[in-house]
Image (tube, grey):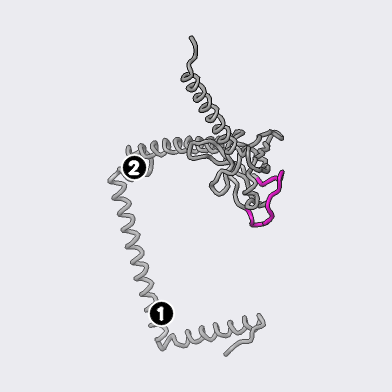
């Protein structure tokens, strides 16, 4: 069957639209990956890349400014992450800027976040410079610690439950005290007796003070108290002289 001119036009139009879509897709992907703009590279060394992958975005001030170019293990405890950035942001990234690993949303892909510098250096970065890396929090270690805390909390809760059960059933000293009316009454009686004893001591002390003042006023004992006061004064003077302090009269 021969192909008509109308079919040829449709095939040509379909082919043109397909090629145009392919070119637009290449341009869109290339623009996101900075394939058609001037770029420069910097890198950081992390202890843990936390799931970061080649091609993930790099953000500065909340804007995508580049992509992760490569991730290479340099030692048993370090991995080098190279990023490609658009040249139009180079003047804003200083030599003391820092790289950190974040997430695109709560459960999104990992990405590199560049923190602005300018605190210790105002010089812009150069192609191939190394920036300080802020290592991500090790989630596995946190989960392990939280598991230990939860286990200890369960043991503590179980122990407290046993103690409360024993107290409620009247076991132990505290349990007997809380559940025994006799012990409670005996304790109340002891407290009352202690209060009465303290009141008697206070009353006796007041009486002794009154008697002492009356004795000092008695003409038969005035001489005795005067001698005691004079002797105390003389002793004080002698101690002051022995210590090199002049006595005051």
Frontmost residue, 246 versus 221 = 246
Q: Earlier in the sequence, mark 1 or mark 2?
A: 2
List x then y, in percent, for residue 109.
Answer: 53, 35
Is residue 127 inside the magenta stretch?
A: yes
Element type at mark 2: helix
* Callout count: 2
Q: Residues within 10 Å of mark 1 (few under 14, many from 20)?
A: few
Q: Residue furthest front?
A: 5
Comparing labels 1 and 2, the label whose residue is closer to the camera: 2
Q: Residue furthest top?
A: 1
Drawn side of residue 3 relative to residue 175, left or right: right
The vertical placement of 56 against 188, above or below, is: above
Which secondary structure dominates the residues rendered in magenta? loop
Frontmost residue, 78 versus 82 = 82
Q: Identify the residue under disc 1.
A: 212
Element type at mark 1: helix
List x then y, in percent, for residue 222.
Answer: 44, 87
List x then y, in percent, for residue 139.
Answer: 55, 37
Residue at image coords 67%, 57%: 122
Extent of the magenta region: 117-132
The vertical placement of 108 against 236, above or below, is: above
Frontmost residue, 6 versus 237 = 6
Drawn side of residue 229 relative to residue 215, left or right: right
Q: Identify the residue under disc 2.
A: 176
> Taking the image as drawn, is residue 245 in sight?
yes
Q: Which mark is residue 117?
A: none
């Amino acid at each position: 069957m021969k192909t008509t001119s109308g079919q040829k036009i449709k095939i040509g139009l379909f082919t043109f639209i397909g090629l145009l879509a392919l070119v637009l897709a290449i341009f869109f992907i290339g623009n996101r990956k900075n394939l058609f703009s001037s770029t420069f590279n910097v890198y950081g060394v992390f202890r843990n890349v936390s799931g970061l992958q080649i091609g993930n975005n790099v953000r500065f001030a909340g804007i995508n400014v580049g992509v992760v170019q490569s991730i290479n293990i340099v030692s048993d405890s370090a991995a080098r992450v190279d990023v490609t950035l658009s040249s139009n942001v180079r003047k804003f990234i200083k030599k003391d800027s820092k790289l950190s690993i974040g997430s695109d949303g709560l459960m999104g892909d990992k990405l590199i976040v560049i923190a602005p510098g300018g605190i210790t250096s105002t010089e812009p970065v150069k192609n191939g410079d190394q920036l300080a890396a802020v290592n991500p929090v090790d989630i596995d270690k946190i989960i392990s610690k939280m598991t230990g805390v939860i286990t200890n909390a369960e043991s503590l809760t179980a122990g407290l439950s046993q103690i409360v059960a024993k107290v409620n059933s009247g076991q132990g000293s505290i349990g007997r005290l809380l559940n025994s009316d006799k012990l409670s009454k005996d304790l109340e009686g002891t407290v009352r007796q202690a209060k009465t004893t303290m009141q008697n001591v206070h009353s006796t002390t007041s009486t002794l003070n009154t008697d002492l003042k009356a004795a000092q006023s008695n003409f038969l004992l005035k001489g005795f108290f005067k001698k005691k006061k004079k002797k105390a004064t003389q002793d004080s003077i002698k101690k002051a002289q022995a210590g090199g302090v002049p006595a005051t009269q």
